[in-house]
Each structure stands twice: as structure tokens, then as C-alpha cells.
Amino acid sequence: MPTLPWPTLVSAEIADSRSPAALRTRIAWLCHLARAAAVGWAAWMLIAMVWVWADPTRTANIVGHYLNADLGVFSSWQIALGFAAYIVAWIPIAAVAYCIWQLFGGYLRGRIFTGDAAAWVQRVGIAALTAVAVSIITRRIGWLILTSHAGLPFGTRLFTQFVVPNDLLEVVFSLFVLAVGHVFKVAVQIADDNASIV
């Protein structure tokens, strides 16, 4: 019975440990955790929005705190329009969660070093950038609606807390994910080109 030389056996073991199937096995728990966290985050954001807007007094206190003003009582149309604006802002959040779900679902199916995996990484970045932009815009719209009766200067209503540090952090993270997706896509294309040559 022929025996393989030791370097060949070691090389085979290394190759097996680096195969997509082996990698999928090692990261399966992480994929499930990421998918659960994405869904949990989207659900948490929706629940938090409903919790804040369900109590007009609580909403008035939160917005009034940032503006350092007593906003009094909101009318029903202000609450309805403000809540609608924030629900619109939640849609891109749900899109981010969906893209993360699809990305890690692909990893669980063994589609790790593939073009579609790279595309889903890019989609996560794009959806996250969109979520940040929509959040900033709808936050302004919501505040303008809620302060329409308060007699505050328009500049105060428009520019107070226009962009907060957390917005910049989210933009940086989104750009990072987008860049990683682009690099990943190019790497897959180079690997495919090399494989076609060989």
C-alpha cells in the first residue's frame, strides 16, 4: 500500500481546513448569531419607535429635552405624521437586516468566496448608508412637524441635533462595509480569471 509523503499529508490537511465546507462549519454559529442579531435589531428599533410615539407626553419630553423648550401637548395629527415619518425611516433599517440575513444565509449554504456573497456585502453597505441618510432626513421632518406649534425659530427647529456623532460613526462603518464588499468582489474576479487560465 503506497504511502503519501509527510509534506503531502500536511498540505492536504491545510487545504481541507481552508475549504469552503470547513470554513462554513467553523463559522456556522457566527452566521446564526449574526442573522438573529440583525432581525433582533430591526425588531428592537420598531418596538422602540412604537413605545416612544405611543405616549405623546413622553415624545414631547424627549424632543423638548433636545431643544431645551417646553413643547406643550402635541395634536393627534402631529403624532400621526411624526410616527409615519419614523416608520419610513425604519424601512431601510429592515433592508439592512434583510441584506445581513441573506449574506450570512449564503455563508451557511457554503457560498462564501463567491460573487454573490461579495454583492450582498456591498448591499449591506449601501442599505446602511441609505438608512443613515433617511434617518437624518426623517428626524428633521419629524421635529419640524412636532415643533410647528411651538413658536421656536426655524433655525432652531431645523438644525438642532441635525447630525449627531452616532450618524458619523454609522456612515464610517457603512463605507467600510461597502469598501470590503468592493475588494471582495475584485478578489473573486481575479480568482475566477486565474482559474480560467489554469
Image (spheres, rainbow, N blue to C red):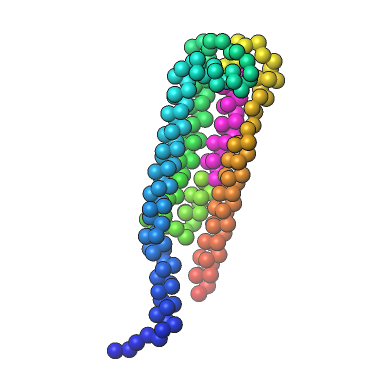
Residue 108, percent from left and from top:
38, 54
* Magenta-colored segment: predominant secondary structure: helix
- Identify the image quadrant of the N terminus: bottom left
- Point 44% across, 24% down: residue: 50
Quarter of the image where one finds residue 15? bottom left
- Point 46% across, 28% down: residue: 48
Residue 87, percent from left and from top:
48, 27
In magenta segment, residue 91:
no
In magenta segment, residue 136:
yes
Q: Which residues are magenta?
A: 125-145
Instruction: Say whether residue 157 is left or right of residue 118.
Output: right
Q: For residue 118, say whether it is visible.
A: yes
- Which of these two is toward me, 88 or 195? 88
Residue 184, percent from left and from top:
54, 57
Q: Is residue 102 above or below residue 46?
A: below
Residue 198, percent from left and from top:
50, 74
Q: Is residue 177 above or below residue 8?
A: above
Quarter of the image where one finds residue 23? bottom left
